[in-house]
Image (cartoon, rainbow, N blue to C red):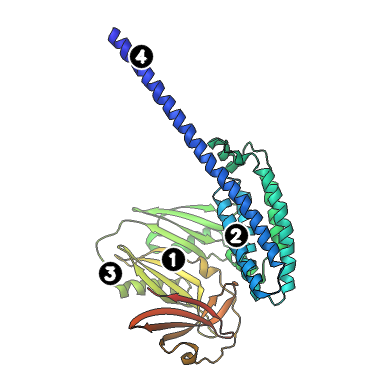
Amino acid sequence: MKKIIFVLCYSVVALSIFAYGKTTESKQLSYLLSGQYAKKMTEASQKLEELDTAVQKTLLFNEKEGFDEAREDIWRLSSDVKNSVGSLPVDRGFSNAWMNYLGRLGNYAKEADRLGDKEEYHQAMTKASFNLREMADEWQVATRDLVSGEVTVEGWQNQLDSVDVDHDWDEMRETVKQYTESDFPLTASESNALKKKELQMLTDQKVTREEAVEHFKTLFPEVSHSSVVVENSQPDAPYPFYHIRFAENGTVGYIDITEKGGHVLSFLSERSFSQKVQSYEFIKDQGERFLKEAGYEDVVLEEARENDTSWHFVFVRVEPVYGAKVFSDAIHLKVAKDTGGIIGLDAMEYIQKEELDRQPITEQNWETFFRPHVTVVEEELAYVENDRMDQRLAHYLTVTLDVNDQIDTYVVVVDTETEEVIKTEKQP
């Protein structure tokens, strides 16, 4: 009996020591984590002050070198503050709005050399400097208690979820949104890109649930007898669509179809695969035939890659005026190797069809445009988005570079009107 009592007492003591040790270890980890967050808070505050100083420096100069150096500081520091804020457990609504503002500030500074009127830049940055100081003061108040290093893990989680917090992060978020709209309003190109992304350009008639299901069964007859469940998109979705889930004989999947026009946004089918492998030509033909039957008749194959079970194809739209490829209007198609059946489709980019402008084509002499050891292997016309989000007609060139008997291949994209080099990319 004494032995049993001794063992029980020993066990209680051991468990108590273990529990105490774990509690102590947990507290130590909590303090360590809190200290790291507090340090990041302090760094964000310091970088924010440096960013405001860099903005003010650009208002000092008319002379190019000093002006350009200060703009580079804005680009670098805005990115630093974004990274700091993004890694902190603070209200996500505020941090997203704040990072958006910082991103637009950095991009505006980076692109300032393209502004014809420096006065426009000075006006924008004068407003930005004032708003940065206002936000820096607000940030100091909001984070005053958080830089102590003594906030618990639960306390940081509350900050992330905006539960039991002392500061009104919602008000700060709305303030930053107002700064964004006033300081760096969307350009026409950015506004159009956003409208396309949210499918605001669609003007087609609405289709009913029944019509959407019928469209699904017509496109994919191999699963047309599936039991289906149809749901509407969430009320806060940027565009309304039908989400159709299906299951039949070991095959499960879904298809999303827009309410306006009944366009297929995406399709995915999961099933087991047999060991049989069809030829590449057969599989490619099956993919092209499907696209024609689905109404995608203005696309050409641009890229093909494979894995163990399927081929993944990328098709791009070809506009009729210049016969130019539109890389932003792409369809991704996944075709099974064993049967040639369609098991995946993403047509979102194609549905967000770009509005393309006519553009002059300046005569080019590539022998003088490039250095002597560069050879143009292939030349096409394509519409490509530049860094200002404009769709530009461009010469899409595949070239080789021969240096010391080392031959590398590059894609070079040159604006047909301005001769601007939009992109240079080394090929694997």
Q: Which circle's residue, 2 or 4, is located before the other in the chain?
A: 4
At horizontal 25% and vertical 64% (from top left) the residue drawn is 276
Residue identified by numbered label 1: 219
* Near-viewer residue (418 or 255): 418
The tag earlier along the polypeptide, 2 or 1, is: 2
What's the amino acid at mark 3? Gln
Which circle's residue, 3 or 1, is located before the other in the chain? 1
Above-or-below relation of 137 to 339: above
Query: Mark 3: few, some, or many residues within 10 Å (few <14, many ≥20)?
Result: few
Left or right of 287 on screen, residue 124: right
CA–CA distance in space, label 4 to label 1: 73 Å
Mark 2 vs mark 1, CA separation in Å = 51 Å
Query: Which numbered disc flags the more N-terminal residue, 2 or 3?
Result: 2
Does the CB distance between marks 4 and 3 fall below 8 Å? Answer: no
**Camera-nearest label, 4 or 1:** 4
Residue 184 in picture, x, y percent from top left: 69, 64
Q: Which amino acid does label 2 sit on?
A: Leu
- Badge 2: residue crowd in 10 Å (few <14, some 14–19, many ≥20): many
**Looking at this rendering, what residue extends furthest in the left direction?**
275
**Secondary structure category for the residue under label 4:** helix
Residue receiving disc 2: 77
The picture places residue 412, in percent across and down from the top left corner, at 47, 80
Give the labeled residue for mark 4. 9
Q: Which residue does the image show at 54% across and 50% down from the upper left?
A: 87
Q: Where's residue 207, x and y in %?
A: 57, 62
CB under 8 Å between callouts 4 and 1? Answer: no
Which label sits on residue 278? 3
Secondary structure, mark 1, is helix
Give me the disc on residue 378: none
